[in-house]
């Protein structure tokens, strides 16, 4: 987020107090943490998902959040939102398997998903300082370029940016 400069502002939503998705809960009325997340996502021009990898897939936390806001089917909050994905892990594959699963889900949710650059970071000692700065200059430059592309992607695909016809 720091590498995005001042043109983008971020809202990092809380995901860990959402109950596990359950159709009966949905029909009883959206739980308040889900309503809070829905409001945050619907207000956003674009979505950036940065994920770790759990057992070669996305985390249950992320899947649960995607599931909740995809329902009811006629009020899917994700549809049409431009999205970019990135990930980091201690393993050499840097979340590639998780991101492939994620791309399939985002395609089904009908979200315009940025294809390049791909970000599969292997976290190594000293790559990120204790105060969250990227120590390695080439990684920093790569991620800065990624954020510029993400900004362009959101501008191009955001529903907010659509010309008003008629
Ligand atoms: C249940 C579980 C499954 C994991 N599976 C993978 C995996 O498939 N691939 C991978 O690269 N890392 C895997 N990890 C490691 C995490 O992605 C992460 O690198 C590690 O938990 C350290 O995270 P932290 O730095 O946020 O504490 C797994 C971790 C957990 C807890």
Image (cartoon, rainbow, N blue to C red):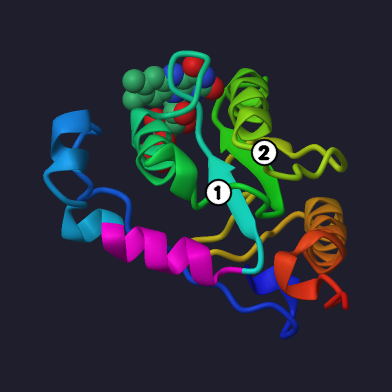
- Separation of residues labelled 2 and 1 (CA atoms): 8 Å
Q: In this view, does 87 lie to the left or right of 74?
A: right
Q: Mark 2 points at which residue?
A: 110
Q: Are marks 2 and 1 in contact (CB under 8 Å)?
A: yes
Q: What residue range appears in magenta?
A: 35-44
Q: Where's residue 73, x and y in %? A: 45, 38
Q: Magenta residues: mostly which secondary structure?
A: helix
Viewer-nearest residue: 121 or 19: 19
Q: Can residue 82 be seen in this view?
A: yes
Name the quarter where the N terminus is drawn: bottom right
Q: Is residue 131 magenta?
A: no
Q: In this view, does 152 lie above or below 17?
A: below
Q: Is residue 166 left or right of residue 38?
A: right
Viewer-nearest residue: 31 or 91: 31
Q: Which image quadrant for residue 98?
A: top right
Q: Quadrant of ligand 1?
A: top left
Q: Which residue lies furthest to the bottom in this view?
A: 6
Q: Where's residue 27, x and y in %? A: 18, 40
Secondary element at image label 2: loop
- Neighbourhood count class around disc 2 (C-alpha, 10 Å): few under 14, some 14–19, many 20 upward: some
């Amino acid at each position: 987020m720091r590498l995005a400069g001042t043109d983008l502002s971020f809202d990092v939503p809380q995901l860990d107090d959402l109950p596990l998705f359950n159709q009966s809960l949905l029909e009883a009325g959206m739980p308040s943490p889900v309503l809070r997340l829905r409001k945050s996502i619907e207000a956003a021009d674009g979505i950036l998902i940065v994920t770790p990898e759990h057992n070669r897939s996305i985390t249950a936390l992320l899947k649960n959040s995607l599931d909740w806001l995809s329902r009811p089917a006629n009020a899917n909050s994700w549809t049409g939102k431009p999205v970019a994905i990135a990930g980091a892990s201690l393993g050499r594959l840097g979340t590639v398997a998780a991101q492939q699963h994620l791309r399939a889900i985002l395609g089904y949710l009908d979200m315009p998903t940025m294809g390049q650059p791909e970000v599969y970071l292997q976290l190594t000692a000293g790559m990120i300082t204790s105060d969250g700065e990227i120590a390695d200059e080439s990684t920093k430059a790569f991620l800065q370029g990624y954020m510029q592309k993400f900004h362009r992607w959101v501008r191009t695909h955001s529903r907010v940016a659509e010309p008003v016809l008629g």
